[in-house]
Amino acid sequence: MYNSGMVCLPCDFYLLPAPEVARNLLGMILVREINGQRVSGRIIETEAYSGEEDQACHARSGRTDRNAVMYGPPGRAYVYFTYGMHWCLNAVTGAEGSPEAVLIRAVQPLEGFGIITRNRQGVAEKNWTDGPAKLCRAFEIDRAMYGAVMCSETSPLRIEQGEPLPDAQVIRSPRVGIQYAPEPWISKPWRFRVKPD
DNA sequence: ATCTAGATGACCT
DNA sequence: GGTCATCTAGATG
């Protein structure tokens, strides 16, 4: 049997360029620990944002207080606030000094249904964590998780080993919500999804 | 099922 | 002051 769950991904996992890490994160397990309780989900959708030259990346205008963690070592959480009310989670990738990150866009809930339902009251189960801000709401991810080391067993926010996916089950397409970006960035196939059953 | 508008505040020009 | 790596309710066919 494949050794999945409870094994934290090593920091080296995040050392590759963002598009490769985005692909490899599919099937891995996002874990949030709240008062000793595990809330977890299988990562099923990601997007890569890759460096200052990527005109859709938050680092396109250089280093700021907001994106500073992207310039640090890989494996940390870049959590940002947008549209006046939403938080979104990224995993920092690439070598230190190279501002790259992978946006976690959707997960499939596995553990912590009590906490998830409490945080997503009145929402249909299929819509609990099927968007980047929705999953942060469900998993209680906000400013407090900025910079969290996700490649550490003791972190309140981490990613554990899951079942890797074969290429046949991966859908690649352009990123969403970046209409402002010029070519070639708007067309880069840097959105990765697990093909539905 | 698909579309549109409004929310709401940090960020950048 | 305009924009934004989004979400939700409500309208419409």
Image (tube, coloured by chain):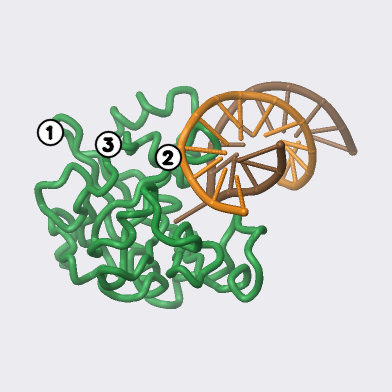
Chain colours: A green, B orange, C brown
From mark 3 to mark 1, how far is it between C-alphas?
17 Å
Expressed as whole percent of the image width and height from the top left, the position of residue A57 reads: 49, 62
Dot 2 or dot 1, earlier in sequence = 1
Which residue is found at the position 19% from the left and 53% from the top? A149
Q: Amino acid at mark 3?
A: Ala
Amino acid under label 1?
Gly
Of pointers 2 and 3, the one earlier in the residue sequence = 2
Residue A89's disc number:
none
The answer to whether residue A84 is left or right of residue A165 is right
Relative to A134, does residue A57 appear above or below in the rendering? below
Tag 3: Cα neighbours inside 10 Å, few (<14), some, or many (≥20)? few
Instruction: Identify the residue position indicated by label 3 in the image.
Output: A144
* Residue under disc 2 on the same chain as residue under disc 1: yes
Label 1, on which residue?
A: A36
CB within 8 Å, label 3 to label 1: no
- Image quarter of residue A141: top left
